[in-house]
Image (cartoon, rainbow, N blue to C red):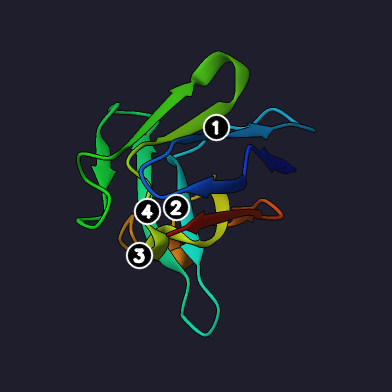
Amino acid sequence: QLQACGGGLVQAGGSLRLSCLASGRTFSSYFMGWFRQAPGKEREFVATLSRNSGNIYYADSVKGRFTISGDNAKNLVYLQMNKLEPEDTAVYYCAVASQFRAYRFDQPRRYDLWGQGTQVTVSS
């Protein structure tokens, strides 16, 4: 079970920090990451952290503004979002790839566990 929190309403240029806790059972994972979905749009990749290599990947649209980090021992992943823009408004989902699937890390199908989503609204 994944529980995400930290969303809210913020003015453009502001910051928010999202947190996601993976609880309920112990599992290993390939990736822990974040996706977002704006109204009328498909779910899109934001950032992910490889549990094995420690490599981090970002969508071009958030590079330099967002930072993903994690605590492997506690099954926590964070998303620090700075310099927020109205275009960042969306429901943000944390996701875990706990099993191998033949999809890229930036594809939703790579992930088998999903949180409930937390709303982020950025006003102009």
N-term-proximal mark, 4 vs 3:
4
Q: Nearer the viewer, residue 77 or 40?
A: 40
Q: Please rate how many residues cluster around mark 2, counting C-alpha atoms within 10 Å: few if below 14, some from 14 to 19, many from 20.
A: few
Point 47% across, 81% down: residue: 41
Q: Please rate how many residues cluster around mark 4, counting C-alpha atoms within 10 Å: few if below 14, some from 14 to 19, many from 20.
A: many
Q: Which residue is mark 4?
A: 46
Nearer the camera: disc 4 or disc 3: 4
Point 25% across, 43% down: residue: 57
Q: Which residue is mark 2?
A: 100
* Numbered label attached to residue 103: 3
Task: Give, as a three-letter code, the residue at label 1.
Answer: Ser
Secondary structure found at label 3: loop
> On screen, 113 above or below 50?
below
Point 25% across, 32% down: residue: 55
- Residues marked 3 and 2 touching at CB (< 8 Å): no
* Numbered label attached to residue 28: 1
Residue 21, image x, y percentages: 66, 31
N-term-proximal mark, 2 vs 4:
4
- Residues marked 2 and 4 touching at CB (< 8 Å): no
Task: Give, as a three-letter code, the residue at label 4.
Answer: Val
Q: CA distance from mark 2 to mark 4?
A: 20 Å
Secondary structure found at label 2: loop
Residue 14 found in image quarter: top left
Position of the C terminus, as image quadrant, is bottom left
Nearer the camera: disc 1 or disc 4: 4
Point 74% across, 31% down: residue: 23
